């Protein structure tokens, strides 16, 4: 079932081009009895059968041996958190993944405890087995592998990461069935188009997915310091949010202007000033979150300010601290992507999470 499905379309092409590979291991091949059985009756009674520990264990060990290190082992099961884009991106950072698909009522708990690192459901409905879950995961993760979507398309910069639905799309003709394309899209004013798209994304999310909107944060990225910090901040922001706002706090005019963020905002402060001097005094919060990124050069990573001092400082300004991160301003694209993901997992998904630890 898996091998049939992955031969098609985008994933099929990526496999043929050697960009990704999908190998399948049949658990039945690791049966420990002469009939090729891999299930047995449940202890304690009840309907249905349970998959035995040993064949599952041997099949997973076989898969592990084909990888370089200690791969994450993901068990597809309805008894798990539902897969979302943040989880997809975190899985996409891995070199190898092992996906474990169950059948019958489930798998003996003891082998799961020994081999599984992640439990993933694809939604709150009941399937006949884990294979469609695995295929969904393979499809979603593969989009983040460079080359899978083609040369100039990338799975970056999507509004899903902001917990917003996408804005509506239009193409030619300008009028179809007496319906005109929204004029702003023909204006050629890029800033106005972006603002319209953001407003439409919020409107749609309100209408169709109010549950998502509760988790949505608008990201304000303020940076100050050397010019290269600005370049780093822009790269980081684009990976944290599709609609983020970038503010250069080297500018005196901005420093003098009072700006108060709301409880729906996350401040992403990026600076090479580890001592915490010359922080923007007039940038205030109102139950807002702040993630501080100290973007130094690789050889000067030691912060002079302690985490406690930093937390106390931002709390006085109306922020709850959502992490202090140390990064190299010259970090490569992958390192920046990893940092962006960590910030989103700590600060955007759980906006009042406190200090999840330093990086
Ligand atoms: C379905 C396994 C139901 C076990 C109470 C007692 C993988 C899946 C699956 C399956 C049961 C995913 C029951 C969303 C899914 C999967 C097969 C439990 C019924 N209830 N994501 N017994 N939904 N499903 N048996 O079903 O393996 S990811």
Image (cartoon, grey):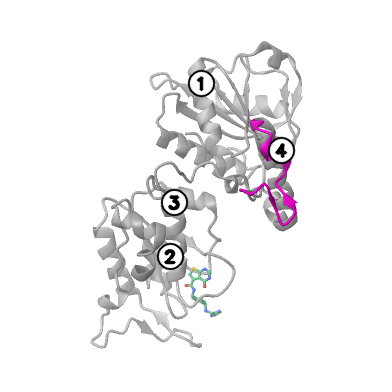
Q: Quadrant of residue 190?
A: top right
Tell whether label 3 touches label 2 (CB within 8 Å): no
Q: Determine if the C-beta at disc 4 is less than 8 A from ligand 1.
A: no
Tell whether label 4 touches label 1 (CB within 8 Å): no
Residue with the mark numbered 4: 184
Tell which circle, 2 or 3, labels the residue nearer the N-terminal end.
2
Res 76 visible: no
Q: Between marks 4 and 2, how big is the CA–CA gap?
A: 41 Å
Residue with the mark numbered 3: 143
**Residue at figure coordinates x 42%, y 34% from the top left:** 333
Viewer-nearest of labels 3 and 1?
3
Question: Which residue sits furthest top?
Answer: 252
Viewer-nearest of labels 4 and 2?
4
Secondary structure of the residue carrying numbered label 4: helix
Instruction: From the viewer's side, name the closer residue of 203 and 173.
Output: 173
Q: Determine if the C-beta at disc 1 is less than 8 A from ligand 1.
A: no
- Percent position of residue 220, x then y: 65, 31
Tell which circle, 4 or 2, labels the residue nearer the N-terminal end.
2
Q: Determine if the C-beta at disc 3 is less than 8 A from ligand 1.
A: no
- Percent position of residue 156, x then y: 50, 42
Residue with the mark numbered 1: 229
- Percent position of residue 40, x then y: 38, 85
**Residue at figure coordinates x 61%, y 25% from the top left:** 310
Using a 10 Å C-alpha cutoff, classify the residue at mark 1 as few (fewer than 14 neighbours), some (14 to 19) or many (20 or more): many
Q: Give the magenta part as a residue range.
A: 172-190
Viewer-nearest of labels 1 and 4?
4
Q: Between marks 1 and 4, how big is the CA–CA gap?
A: 33 Å
Q: Between marks 2 and 3, how big is the CA–CA gap?
A: 15 Å
Residue with the mark numbered 2: 134
Using a 10 Å C-alpha cutoff, classify the residue at mark 4 as few (fewer than 14 neighbours), some (14 to 19) or many (20 or more): some
């Amino acid at each position: 079932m898996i091998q049939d499905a992955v031969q098609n379309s985008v994933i099929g092409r990526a496999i043929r081009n050697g960009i990704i590979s999908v190998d399948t291991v049949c658990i039945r091949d690791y049966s420990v009895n002469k009939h090729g059985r891999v299930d047995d009756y449940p202890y304690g009674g009840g309907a249905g059968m349970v998959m035995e520990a040993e064949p599952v264990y041997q099949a997973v060990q076989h898969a592990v041996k084909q990888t370089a290190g200690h791969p994450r082992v993901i068990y597809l099961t309805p008894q798990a958190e539902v897969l979302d884009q943040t989880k997809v991106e975190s899985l996409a950072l891995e070199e190898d993944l092992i996906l474990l698909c169950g059948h019958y009522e489930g798998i003996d708990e003891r082998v799961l405890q020994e081999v599984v690192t992640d439990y993933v459901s694809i939604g709150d409905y009941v399937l006949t087995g884990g294979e469609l879950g695995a295929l969904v995961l393979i499809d979603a993760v593969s989009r983040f592998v460079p080359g899978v979507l083609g040369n100039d398309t990338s799975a970056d910069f999507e509004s899903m990461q902001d917990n917003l639905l996408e804005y509506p799309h239009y193409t030619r003709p300008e009028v179809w069935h007496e319906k005109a394309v929204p004029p702003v899209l023909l204006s050629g004013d890029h800033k106005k188009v972006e603002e319209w798209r953001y407003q439409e994304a919020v409107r749609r999310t309100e209408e169709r997915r109010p549950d998502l909107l509760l988790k949505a944060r608008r990201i304000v990225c303020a940076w100050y310091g050397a010019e290269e910090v600005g370049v780093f901040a822009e790269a980081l922001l684009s990976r944290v949010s599709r609609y983020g706002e970038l503010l250069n706090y080297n500018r005196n005019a901005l420093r003098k202007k009072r700006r108060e963020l709301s409880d729906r905002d996350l401040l992403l402060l990026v600076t090479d000033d580890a001592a915490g001097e010359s922080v923007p005094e007039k940038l205030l919060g109102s139950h807002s979150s702040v993630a501080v990124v100290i973007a130094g050069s690789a050889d000067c990573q030691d912060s002079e300010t302690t985490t406690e001092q930093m937390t106390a400082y931002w709390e006085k300004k109306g922020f709850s601290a959502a992490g202090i991160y140390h990064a190299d301003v010259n970090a490569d694209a992958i390192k920046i992507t990893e940092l962006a993901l960590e910030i989103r997992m700590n600060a955007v998904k759980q906006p009042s999470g406190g200090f999840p630890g330093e990086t």
